[in-house]
């Protein structure tokens, strides 16, 4: 792959997929907290 | 609203809403638009519009549906004022007009899945002739009726017993199939050439406004922002459900899947095509039929050395397409059904009305690809207007108070900041106005008879159809409001 393609791939893929994974982890954390609150 | 009418959990809401967003637009439209707009150069504005257009509108749709517990007509009337109910009706009309021909497209996917499973697809000597014979006959109408019937049966059972139960299997299955196909595609010899094209930016292309327009319409098309569909599912959110984080999950999730599909398609095409792969993708014909139904079956014939495995992979691809299309179509049927329910009709009767309308008004597109292309053109661009109407409703209500009281309500996990006010007040309307005006001005050069409403793809047909619909909706605005009051 040419360098420009590699750079763009390293920006776009982590931004989009990283964004998704970050949001997912955040949602999981909030759900866990709500469940603990509910049980408590 | 009864507890059994709501989505049973946050995850079910997210999966179902992701089912709206992930459709055929991610799998085939995205790849074609990338190819037509300079490969990697397109990805830059496409990601920018996720933040500038799609995310603010998805947040708004969730908030409107959850706070008003009504479909677009009721939600816009309650937020902006009763005199603007027609704007909500326009949003409903655009999504429903798309539903009429989208069920035909979903039917094509089902037909090709059945052809792949039976081996009929690979027995064809020419895929072009196979497609022409299919599309010219009555079979598209038969598959359209089957598909609209399936959707009706699902929506009839309601949200928790119908939509949720089906999408919880369809969406994960779709994702698994896409990952399998992605792994096979990127491990093909020569797949790197496809990835190279997909990610190589041509910075000169970034000064071409067409690339920006296409990036915005593609993002609106594949995230489902501004369609009114997310607003409709948000009616069934639990009261203490978050808005902003769920909206972000849908936006990022949808774009992540588009990237996966793009890498899969480009790797496959560049690896297996003996012709100029770029020409094959970018000239894949109107309504994207060429790439998906003519060119890709040729490639699946040689994707591995084993004919049986090729058949399995082709079947999986068309099954994924069918699942993607079906989950989006279900939400369109629900939106139309919900509109009748808001007018005081019970769900059972409402679904019968929608099925009859969907079956009949989808038939012209089933028999004429030209008409389908015209409708895709007119109402696809109409989504920009729908997005602008949502933005208008929130501005009219007061953006800051909407954000503070509705979006950042008791159920919110994360609070939305003042950036949202700037987006909804200035950025979203600015984008809509600039792009619509640019599109109208430049359309004069596409067609010498740009004003002629009987051409398939020009400004005249769009302005004529939009004008007609808006005039009728303005005329019946009082009746629309009266219909909402019947429900009370």
Image: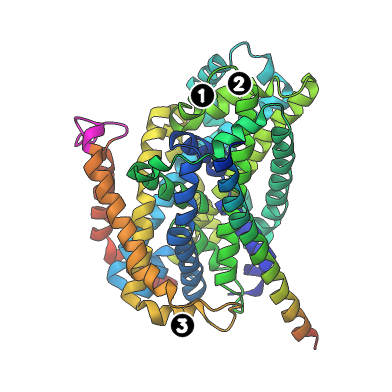
Mark 3 packing: few (<14 Cα in 10 Å), some, or many (20+)? Answer: some
Query: From the viewer's perspective, is the residue at label 3 or at label 1 nearer?
Result: 1
Q: CA distance from mark 2 to mark 3?
A: 54 Å
Residue A27, percent from left and from top: 67, 70
Residue B47, percent from left and from top: 50, 53
Q: Is residue B327 visible?
A: yes
Residue B353, percent from left and from top: 48, 51
State which quarter of the image contains the N terminus of chain B: bottom right
Residue with the most extreme front position = A3
**Residue at the spot x=55%, y=65% of the render?**
B247
Residue with the most extreme bottom position = A40
Query: From the viewer's perspective, is the residue at label 2 or at label 3 nearer?
Result: 2
N-terminal-most mark, 2 or 1: 2
Please name the predominant secondary structure of the magenta segment in the image.
loop
N-terminal-most mark, 2 or 3: 2
Q: CA distance from mark 3 to mark 1?
A: 50 Å
Magenta stretch, residue numbers: B444-457
The residue carrying mark 3 is B404
Helix, strand or loop at label 1? It is helix
Q: Contact, CB < 8 Å: mark 2 with mark 1? A: yes
Helix, strand or loop at label 3? It is helix
Badge 2 sits on which subunit? B
Question: Residue B280 has which mark?
Answer: 1
The residue carrying mark 2 is B273
State which quarter of the image contains the C terminus of chain B: bottom left
């Amino acid at each position: 792959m040419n360098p420009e393609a590699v750079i763009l791939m390293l920006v776009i893929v982590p931004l989009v997929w990283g964004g998704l994974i970050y949001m997912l982890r955040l949602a999981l954390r909030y759900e866990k907290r709500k469940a603990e609150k509910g049980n408590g | 609203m009864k507890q059994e009418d709501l989505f049973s959990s946050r995850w079910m809401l997210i999966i179902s809403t992701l089912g709206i967003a992930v459709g055929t637009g991610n799998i085939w439209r995205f790849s074609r638009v990338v190819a037509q707009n300079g490969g990697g150069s397109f990805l830059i504005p496409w990601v920018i519009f996720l933040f500038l257009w799609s995310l603010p509108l998805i947040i708004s749709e969730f908030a409107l549906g959850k706070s008003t517990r009504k479909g677009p007509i009721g939600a816009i009337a309650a937020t902006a004022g009763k005199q603007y109910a027609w704007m909500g009706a326009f949003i409903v009309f655009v999504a429903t007009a798309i539903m009429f021909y989208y069920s035909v497209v979903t039917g094509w996917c089902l037909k090709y899945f059945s052809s792949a499973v039976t081996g009929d697809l690979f027995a064809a000597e020419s895929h072009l002739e196979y497609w022409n014979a299919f599309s010219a006959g009555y079979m598209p109408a038969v598959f359209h009726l089957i598909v609209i019937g399936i959707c009706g049966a699902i929506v009839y059972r309601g949200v928790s017993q119908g939509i949720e139960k089906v999408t919880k299997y369809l969406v994960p299955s779709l994702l698994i199939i896409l990952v399998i196909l992605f792994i096979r595609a990127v491990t093909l010899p020569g797949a790197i050439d496809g990835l190279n094209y997909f990610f190589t930016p041509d910075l000169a292309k970034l000064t071409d406004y067409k690339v920006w327009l296409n990036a915005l319409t593609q993002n609106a098309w594949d995230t489902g922002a501004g369609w009114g569909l997310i607003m409709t599912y948000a009616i069934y959110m639990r009261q203490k459900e978050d808005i902003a984080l769920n909206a972000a999950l849908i936006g990022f999730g949808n774009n992540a899947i588009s990237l996966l599909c793009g890498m899969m398609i480009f790797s496959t095409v560049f690896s297996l095509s003996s012709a100029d792969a770029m020409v094959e993708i970018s000239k894949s014909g109107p309504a994207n039929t060429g790439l998906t139904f003519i060119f890709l079956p040729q490639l699946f014939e040689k994707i591995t050395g084993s004919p049986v495995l090729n058949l399995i992979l082709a079947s999986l691809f068309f099954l994924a397409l069918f699942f993607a299309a079906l989950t989006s179509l279900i939400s369109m049927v629900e939106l139309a059904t919900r509109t009748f329910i808001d007018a005081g009709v019970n769900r059972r009767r409402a679904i019968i009305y929608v099925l009859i309308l969907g079956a009949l008004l989808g038939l012209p597109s089933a028999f004429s690809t030209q008409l389908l292309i015209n409708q895709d053109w007119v109402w696809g661009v109409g989504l920009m207007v729908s997005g602008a109407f949502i933005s208008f409703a929130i501005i009219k209500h007061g953006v800051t108070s909407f954000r503070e009281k509705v979006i950042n309500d008791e159920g919110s996990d994360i609070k939305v900041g003042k950036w949202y006010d700037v987006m909804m007040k200035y950025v979203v309307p600015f984008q809509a106005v600039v792009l619509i005006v640019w599109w109208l001005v430049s359309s004069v050069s596409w067609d010498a008879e740009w004003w002629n409403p009987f051409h398939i793809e020009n400004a005249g047909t769009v302005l004529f159809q939009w004008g007609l619909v808006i005039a009728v909706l303005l005329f019946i605005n009082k009746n629309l409001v009266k219909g909402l009051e019947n429900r009370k």
